[in-house]
Image (spheres, grey):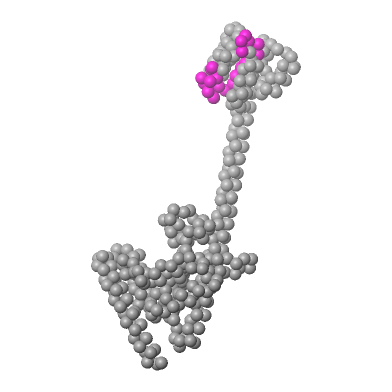
């Protein structure tokens, strides 16, 4: 059974309404406005209706209605005024405050029951409709948020695609410059300074993982600012001195900016890795702008490139037995490769001197 609250300073009225309604509702009673508010707070949200007298000593019905409006309780409970008041102005004032209906004294059982029943059902229907509207509003807001997120992701994908295109263009610029130098060396020295150029763009997964390790979220801005090896080229040279000569003349070009240099030939890594690394700022010329892009340029000898390829397989191959022994063998091979590279370079120099 639903719970209702009857508020009237006259005990006879309270008892009369209790007897009329006890078969249909749990009837709580209060003799003044202050007690009514205490009951409403005690049974928070449990009353299906409030039957309220207007003329009461202390806190009258209008004062109770003001508190209900201030606390927002009128949104959750229908209020029916029980009064002998016949003034149209008083009734209109009550309706403006948010009263649902009037029950005039003297009470008629059928009218009392029907007015309460109608008020409770209408208020319940109103609440359900409001809840449905709120739910639909939340659903629409959620859909709007999803659409905005999708639009943002599509924009990020588009921007990321544009960025990868720009890195690709930067690699093409570097490769063209290297090929021009190769042609010039071929004419001047009757030999080529490098044997091959290999290029690669990091995959989105590799980019994401590297940013994560550095502590940055995956954004286009962070890719450009914090990564220098998204675009990479590897130049395979025959001899160590060709590496330094080629790197030097390449870096001297006036539109190339060397941001960082790491010489692992003179200062090999502990595992024996040897290579010369340059991080460059390379200009690309787009339809609306000139833009500098970071490119990593690596120089290795033929033998060291073969060694690095094998070492890379070991690093990413799972379930390899005796890895420590293999690492030691690779270190020995790297040291042997260094001796071999310089020995071959000496032999080449002897041959070139004989030609002169």
Taking the magenta stretch, the answer to whether it contains residue 198 is no
Asked if residue 18 shows in the view, the reply is: no
Q: Residue at x 38, y 90 (%)?
A: 353
Single out the residue that lies furthest toward the right: 88
Work out whether residue 135 or residue 306 is closer to the camera in this orientation and state it: 306
The C terminus: image quadrant: bottom left
Q: Residue at x 59, y 11 (%)?
A: 32
Q: Is 2 placed left or right of 57 in the picture?
A: left
Work out whether residue 75 or residue 253 is closer to the camera in this orientation and state it: 253
Work out whether residue 183 or residue 351 is closer to the camera in this orientation and state it: 351
Residue 344 position, x and y percent, is: 34, 83
Residue 251 position, x and y percent, is: 49, 73
Q: Where is 163 relative to 342, above or below?
A: above
Q: Residue at x 60, y 67 (%)?
A: 290
Q: Residue at x 59, y 14 (%)?
A: 33
Residue 20 position, x and y percent, is: 59, 13
Taking the magenta stretch, the answer to whether it contains residue 56 is yes
Q: Is 233 placed left or right of 169 in the picture?
A: left
Q: Is 105 placed left or right of 296 in the picture?
A: right
The quarter of the displayed image where residue 236 is located: bottom left
Asked if residue 207 shows in the view, the reply is: yes
Residues in magenta, as a range: 38-59
The quarter of the displayed image where residue 131 is located: top right
Residue 71 position, x and y percent, is: 59, 24
Q: Where is 140 relative to 233, above or below?
A: above
Please give the count of numbered marks on the rendered protein: 0
Single out the residue that lies furthest toward the bottom: 355
């Amino acid at each position: 059974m639903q719970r209702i609250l009857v508020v009237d300073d006259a005990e006879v009225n309270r008892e009369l309404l209790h007897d009329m309604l006890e078969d249909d509702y749990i009837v709580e009673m209060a003799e003044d406005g202050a007690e009514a508010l205490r009951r409403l707070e005690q049974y928070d949200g449990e009353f299906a209706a409030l039957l309220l007298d207007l003329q009461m000593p202390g806190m009258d019905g209008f004062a109770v209605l003001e508190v209900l409006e201030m606390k927002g309780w009128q949104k959750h409970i229908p209020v029916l005024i029980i009064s002998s008041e016949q003034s149209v102005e008083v009734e209109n004032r009550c309706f403006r405050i948010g009263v649902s209906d009037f029950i005039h004294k003297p009470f008629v059982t059928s009218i009392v029951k029907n007015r309460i029943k109608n008020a409770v059902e209408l208020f319940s229907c109103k609440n359900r409709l409001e809840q449905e509207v709120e739910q639909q509003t939340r659903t629409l807001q959620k859909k709007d948020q999803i659409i905005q997120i999708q639009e943002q992701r599509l924009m990020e994908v588009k921007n990321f695609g544009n960025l990868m295109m720009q890195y690709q263009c930067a690699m093409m610029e570097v490769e063209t410059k290297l090929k021009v130098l190769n042609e010039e060396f071929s004419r001047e020295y009757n030999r080529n300074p490098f044997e091959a150029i290999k290029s690669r763009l990091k995959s989105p997964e590799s980019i994401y993982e590297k940013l994560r390790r550095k502590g940055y979220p995956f954004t286009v801005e962070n890719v450009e600012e914090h990564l220098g090896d998204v675009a990479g080229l590897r130049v395979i040279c025959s001899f160590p001195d060709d590496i330094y000569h080629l790197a030097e003349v390449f870096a001297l070009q006036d539109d190339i900016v060397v941001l960082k240099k790491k010489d692992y030939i003179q200062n090999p890594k502990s595992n024996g890795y040897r290579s010369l690394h340059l991080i460059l700022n390379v200009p690309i010329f787009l339809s609306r702008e000139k833009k500098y892009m970071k490119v990593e340029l690596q120089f290795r000898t033929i033998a060291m490139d073969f060694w690095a390829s094998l070492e890379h397989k070991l690093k990413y191959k799972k379930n390899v037995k005796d890895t420590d022994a293999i690492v030691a063998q690779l270190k020995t091979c790297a040291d042997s490769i260094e001796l071999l590279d310089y020995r071959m370079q000496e032999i080449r120099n002897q041959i070139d001197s004989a030609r002169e």
